[in-house]
Amino acid sequence: MKLEGEKMTGKMKALRLYAPGDIRCVEVDIPKIERDTQVKIKVKSCGVCGSDIPRVLVKGTYNFPTTIGHEFAGEIIEVGLGVSNVKLGDRVTVLPMIPCGRCDYCNRMYLTCAIHTITMVLGEMVPWQNILL
């Protein structure tokens, strides 16, 4: 696979939840693009979602440790060869849910319906049109 763009490797800082109330700023590996349909986004800003507050303070999450911050915006710094709908340098935000792309809600562009979506996994930046294959 060939890639275009800045080849960021090494470590980056991430806010990780290890248990309810146990939040740490740690260094983690910078994710690598593994498929031609993926892009890498350099995060420029990140918000706190209303669902993050009880998850971080009380309820916990599906597995630990979990990187916090699924509502973010940034700049595309690396693209796989199969990506044609965005380019290097584009400023983007991500949909924090991955829609199924098949149900009536998705067909009407209501992409965050709770019926068929899954939570986005950080590092897996796949445009929703490309996950239908």
Image (spheres, rainbow, N blue to C red):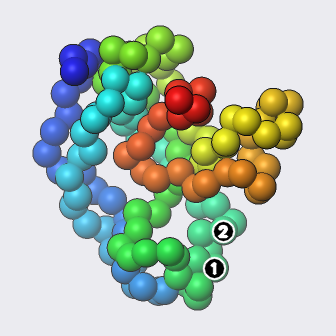
> Are the residues flagged by discs 1 and 2 in contact, CB closer than 8 Å?
yes
Give, as a three-letter code, the residue at label 2.
Ser
Find residue 82 and report its horizontal and vertical position in percent. Answer: 39, 16
Answer above or below: position of 93 versus 47.
above
Which residue does the numbered mark 2 point to in the structure image?
51
- At 39% from the left and 30% from the top, the residue drawn is 38
Left or right of residue 7: residue 83: right
Visible in this render: residue 77?
Answer: no
Which residue does the numbered mark 1 point to in the structure image?
54
Q: Residues within 10 Å of mark 2 (few under 14, many from 20)?
A: few
Q: Residues within 10 Å of mark 1 (few under 14, many from 20)?
A: some
Answer above or below: position of 26 versus 8.
below
Left or right of residue 24: residue 68: right
Answer above or below: position of 25 versus 82.
below
Give the secondary structure at mark 1. Answer: helix
Residue at the outermost front position: 133
Visible in this render: residue 48?
Answer: yes
> 24 or 83: which is nearer to us?
83
- At 16% from the left and 39% from the top, the residue drawn is 9
Q: For the residues marked 1 and 2, what is the alpha-carbon distance in whole angstroms?
A: 6 Å
Left or right of residue 68: residue 42: left
Give, as a three-letter code, the residue at label 1.
Pro
